[in-house]
Amino acid sequence: MKTVIGITAHVDAGKTTLSESLLYLSGAIRNQGRVDHKDSFLDYNKQERERGITIFSKISSIHYNKKDLTFIDTPGHIDFSGEMERALTILDYALLIINGCDGIQSHTKTIFRLLKYYHIPTFLFVNKMDISYLTQEQLLKDLNELSDHIVLLSEINDEELAMKSDTLLEEYLNYNKISHKSLQKAIKEREIFPVYFGSALKNINIKEMLDSITDLIIESPLNNKLKGIVYKILYENNERLTFIKITGGQIHVKEEINGEKINQIRAYQGEKYSLLKQAKQGDIVALTGIKSLKSGDMIGYSSSLMTSIFPVMHYDLHIEDNEQSALMMENLKKLGEEEPLLQLKIRDINHIEVSLMGEVQIEILKQLIKERYHQNISIDHQQISYKETIKYPVEGVGHFEPLRHYAEVHVLLEPLPSGSGLQFENKCMNDLQENYQNLIMTHLKEKTHLGILTGSPITDIKITLLGGASHLKHTEGGDFRQAVYRAVRQGLMMSESILLEPSYHYEITIPSKYISKIFYDFQNYNTPIIKEDNGQNALLYGDAPVLFLSGYNQELMNSTKGNCHLSLLNVFYTPVNNQEEIIKQMNYHPLEDLDNPSGSIFCTHGSGYYVEYDHVSSKMHLPYFSKEKEITHYTYKPIHISDEEVKRVYENTYGKQNIRLNKDIYGIHHKTKANTVTQKKEYLIVDGYNMIFSWDELKDLSQTSLALARDKLINILSNYQGYKKCLLLIVFDGYKVKDNIGEEINYHNIHIVYTKEAQTADAYIESITKTMTDEYRVTVASSDYMEQSMILGHGALRISARELMLEIESLNKKEKEEYLGKQTVFLNTPLEDLINH
């Protein structure tokens, strides 16, 4: 079975050169090409050779030391991160290249975070050591920025190695040595990351590294059930190629996938390919004849892939020659299949929007369209890519019933924590046929659903299928598509929407004398946090809107005379501060968007008619599923008496009353309980010190006494737990306390953990979320973006320190209102009357 290894790196670290070296030393190619000579085996694309960068991922295979290896050479430029991330989804292992002349760079951290997100075992290779001015010891220290579990196996003994992993430590204590099998397993579980030093161009230490890697990798267990991951779509000579990794079972030519017949199975080696009769587990092949599969589809899996990299800017695309507009629009749709992150919105030939990562990708796209389709395009009008979510759960209904058509769909839309993306679940509560349920789930996932504030894509929403209806004779294939789209749209119209803007996590390195300037620049945003300050230079980090940071780098360079470095890390979405202003500026009218109708089509007297979204509930054929039904058997005929009638009878009997309750005045009502989806018990895990240094009140208190700040946080969260009734765990860092063995205590209704020496709160939270998500609905409260990305990979949810603080403040206000609502209030009553009374 083949093992797939991805070669990843920051741009110009030497990925393609290393690929050439590996192919040459293994005998796969006779001559070792060079990127600067424009004759490398893998950079065969014209633009790649001209620019000297990798734009598209490439496949090459070798047989070495009785192992079959497939290498994926991925792009290193940040503008092509989407292509790189799609390749990560099919990797068994990764080889991360570090430029020995530059050390750790910002995009290196992003790649390492993605490898963690996809839980890919990773080897590291520090390249260009033949020309680096940095020593091996300096670079090893620099690598600790990524992880303190990076090890140079040739210079570490078993005792030191055991300190990197609890599993290895236990084995070493029992047997006084570490077995080769345990070392392989520790690498596979990402407990340690072997690193090698050398030069790809000069073939220094490359063979030794290849020998070591082939000795340390473990082949995946055999799986006879057909499974596969589609990671790439490519159009070549007007033929659609679907690139897929077979992760289980096998496929044959002329077999069907999703009702489509496979015409060819191609195995690529660089630019060339050979035809296969079958492909088995571990193979990466390109299929022809398959039209429906798209990048990210998973065959034989219950879930789908959710990528974490996306553009935050979109542009207007203009075609200079409109004579062949229909053909050009079809060609653009094909480009959109190849690069899903383009997120093409084509209303007509004069209104085309495209999302792009940066200037290099813009130039590549222009050249690509000119070479393929012989058309010149221009790209302008850069805009922020907003997103939308909802504030409250809502049941959306879509009905589609023109003459001789029929479908009705009910879906539940629920808000999710920031960064969750869109999630889908089938909880069908009636007898709708299974094939229709599957069709509905497909339609839910296939469309980019747009919000109703600005027409931006929605995010952080869970969409659950509650039920649906079909007709034995009249339901056609596209009816449920129409009903699904209308159900989601109607739900959005009936709920309250929130506009979100993209923000960056950032790091700024500057001379210490400029710290006050940074604080001044960020006065309208979250205050930067000083991570390091030695009096000469300082490292600050935080988060701020993309709109601000996109132009801030040049301003910072001018202010510090170039003596600074701004790193923009991962992107996340937060509510905007000026929602109404942006909505007015965008000038979007949801009811006029004919491509995204919110109303439904009903039929009467043989003809269909349109019903607006807010009247659908009075016409729908199925009842609401999300409202709990109470069935009562009466021995008499029930009658209804209005509140006014009850009040009139009461006052006729006892006289007019002046005593009223506060809750009667302010109208605090209990919402009808929705009992639609069975949820796991909620478990909130809080990074204690992260909260203290993120909340202004606690941060100020910590300057006086950290213990007081810690106690106040514990009391705040104890009160919060009493209201929410969830399980709550607070984790405090104790890793710097010498000889600290850790401590776990129960305080009233919450559990508190102080980590042991050499164990961070991040590491502790990572270890427990792995096992808890199956039993609990786990949410981790932290503003540490590395920790947030880590816990998402374990299936947990996340909430930032600011979001938790706002929720606590909101609950405190609500609790106060409810308390005051129970107090008796006398209105319009003189003091003397009260005394006499």
Image: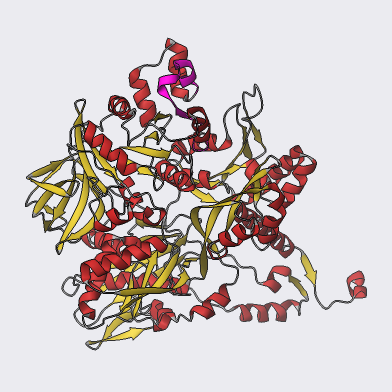
Q: Nearer the viewer, residue 705 or 403?
A: 705
- How far from the left and from the top, in percent, is residue 556? 61, 58
Q: Is residue 34 visible?
A: yes
Q: Nearer the viewer, residue 454 or 547?
A: 547
Residue at point 74%, 63% (across, down): 820
Highlighted range, magenta? 145-163
Q: Nearer the viewer, residue 38 or 675?
A: 38
The quarter of the image holding the N terminus is top left
- How far from the left and from the top, in percent, is residue 319? 30, 78
In terms of image quadrants, where is residue 455? bottom left
Q: Nearer the viewer, residue 2 or 56?
A: 56
Q: Let me know if residue 539 is in the magenta part.
A: no
The quarter of the image holding the C terminus is bottom right
| Up-down relation of residue 635 to residue 17 (above or below) | below
- How far from the left and from the top, in percent, is residue 173? 47, 13
Q: Let me know if residue 154 is in the magenta part.
A: yes
In terms of image quadrants, where is residue 119? top left
Residue at point 15%, 73% (across, down): 473
Q: Is residue 241 left or right of residue 593?
A: left
